[in-house]
Image (cartoon, grey):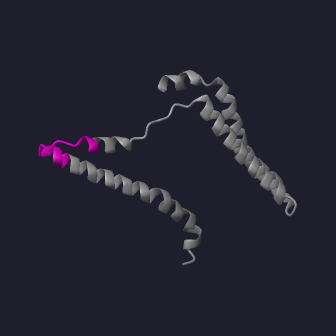
Amino acid sequence: MEILIPLAPFIMVVAIVVIPKWLRSRERQEMQATIRAAIDKGQELPPELIEAMSKDVKVRKVSTAQSDIRTGIILIAVGAGIAAFGWMVGYEESDAVYPLMGIGLIPGLIGIAYVVLSFFNPNKTDRIEKQV
């Protein structure tokens, strides 16, 4: 039973991520088999079924300057939160300040990069107006 303690994080990842994806994949396979059988028998597919199937398809969103700024600000806030946590922990454990501030720099610098890239994004507002 003690062997499960170090394996717990991996078991949680499997339970949270892998199993639902596997179940969705199995559900899609069964749906495709049902549709193939209906087509082989010459039955027409209702438009509601086709619409429901196409609704699950993920559409890649075009990155805009506004979405880049939002992502950047969120990452900067996450980095600042980790750094502030390190600063507060530093009152009790002074060895924890620099590692936590270093970890906070990673999302913070990625956020700064997003904000800077938002100014150079060619898909600024003209792309949004064309889609609407």
Residue 99 showing in the rendered view: no
Q: Residue furthest bottom?
A: 1
| Magenta-colored stretch includes residue 56 | no
Q: Position of residue 104 (x, y in %)?
A: 74, 48
Q: Position of residue 51 (x, y in %)?
A: 31, 41
> What is the magenta range?
36-49
| Magenta-colored stretch includes residue 42 | yes
- Above or below, comparing residue 121 to residue 15 in the picture: above
Q: Position of residue 29 (x, y in %)?
A: 29, 51
- Above or below, comparing residue 12 to residue 49 in the picture: below
Q: Residue at x 69, y 29 (%)?
A: 116
Q: Residue at x 12, y 43 (%)?
A: 42
In the displayed structure, does residue 92 sit left or right of residue 43? right
Q: Front-most of 47 and 74?
A: 47
Residue 97 showing in the rendered view: yes
Q: Position of residue 88 (x, y in %)?
A: 83, 57
Q: Check the picture and name the quadrant holding the N terminus.
A: bottom right
In the displayed structure, does residue 2 sit left or right of residue 116? left
Q: Residue at x 67, y 25 (%)?
A: 119
Q: Residue furthest left?
A: 41
Location of residue 58 by image quarter:
top left
Exactly how many numbered labels are in the figure?
0
Q: Residue at x 17, y 42 (%)?
A: 44
In the displayed structure, does residue 129 sit left or right of residue 36? right
